[in-house]
């Protein structure tokens, strides 16, 4: 599989509170993580960094010889461990009190993707030129949309649209959504923070990702550029994975 990961601090923030990683598990699965931290001066950066560090360590050592279809409970265990790491650090350090982070995770084999998520970072799958959202935002406005109190258009401009109802590390226990989706030749996966999706319309993300002439590195750069051009008022992070029989794994980092 081919991969790319990019992260940018944006035009307004001075600290990049996003963290990301793409790598391989011990048994050869491709794994990807994106986290968007929150919680005051530098605390968000610490929260997302701790979460990704914990998940990277756990996922890199993932050596279970079991199918992804039977791995949901194991992924929840890894997320719970990362949650405990962030929560305990926040509880024992006043400067990090109430810090937390969103997280999206993808574990990929030749035919399936096991996804886990908490918060409002997202995972999309591009198939046959069409972009599909695979996660559901854990936000106040999404709950209001689901209950019929807000329209999607109203939610997009609501002053509290970034209020998350679930985050990793803010409580001793957290519920993660875990789902198995299919994965086939020609598919492309995007994990991203809301610094992209709050500023760039889905149609434009779809158009950019579906460009047959652009490689993954260029697509990742274009997505960052689109968010920056739209204002860049938040950190922006994207991780991309292409279905491919060859492995070309990008790694992780910040910008």
Image: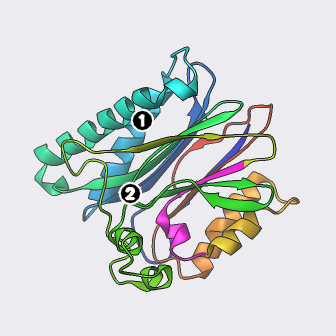
Q: Is residue 12 above or below residue 214?
A: below
In this picture, which residue range is highlighted in magenta?
188-200
Image spot of residue 190 (x, y percent):
62, 54
Q: Is residue 206 above or below residue 244?
A: below
- Residue 220 shows in the view: yes
Residue 224, numbered circle: none
Q: Give the residue furthest to the front.
A: 148
Secondary-structure class at tag 2:
loop
Image spot of residue 202 (x, y percent):
63, 71
Q: At 38% from the left edge and 34% from the top edge, which residue is drawn?
A: 76
Left or right: 247 as drawn, with respect to 141: right
Q: CA distance from mark 2 to mark 1?
A: 16 Å
First-in-chain label (2 vs 1): 1
Question: Where is mark 1, residue-wise?
Answer: 55
Circle 2 or circle 1, nearest the eye: 2
Q: Is residue 191 magenta?
A: yes
Viewer-side residue, 144 vs 10? 144
Image spot of residue 26 (x, y percent):
56, 20
Image spot of residue 38 (x, y percent):
31, 61
Q: At 69% from the left edge and 44% from the top edge, which residue is drawn?
A: 3
Q: In the figure, residue 149 lies in which quadrant? A: bottom left
Question: Where is mark 2, residue-wise?
Answer: 119
């Amino acid at each position: 599989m081919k991969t790319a990961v990019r992260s940018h601090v944006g035009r307004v923030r001075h600290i990049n509170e996003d963290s990301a990683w793409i790598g391989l598990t011990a048994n050869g699965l491709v794994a990807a993580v994106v986290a968007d931290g929150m919680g005051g001066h530098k605390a968000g950066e610490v929260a997302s960094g701790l979460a990704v560090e914990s998940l990277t360590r756990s996922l890199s050592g993932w050596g279970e010889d079991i199918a992804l279809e039977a791995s949901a409970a194991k992924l929840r265990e890894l997320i719970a461990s990362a949650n405990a790491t962030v929560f305990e650090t926040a509880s024992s350090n006043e400067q990090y009190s109430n810090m937390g982070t969103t997280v999206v995770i993808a574990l990929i084999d030749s035919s399936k993707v096991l996804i886990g998520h908490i918060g409002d970072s997202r995972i999309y799958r591009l198939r046959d030129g069409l972009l599909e959202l695979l996660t559901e935002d854990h936000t106040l406005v999404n709950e209001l949309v689901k209950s019929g109190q807000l329209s999607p258009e109203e939610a997009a401009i609501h002053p509290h649209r970034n209020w998350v109802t679930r985050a990793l590390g803010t409580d001793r226990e957290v519920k993660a959504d875990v789902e198995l989706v299919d994965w086939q030749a020609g598919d492309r996966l995007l994990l991203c923070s809301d610094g992209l999706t709050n500023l760039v319309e889905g149609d434009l993300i779809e158009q950019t990702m579906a460009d047959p002439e652009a490689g993954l590195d260029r697509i990742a750069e274009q997505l960052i550029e689109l968010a920056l051009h739209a204002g860049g008022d938040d950190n922006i992070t994207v991780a991309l994975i292409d279905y491919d029989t060859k492995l070309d794994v990008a790694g992780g980092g910040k910008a």
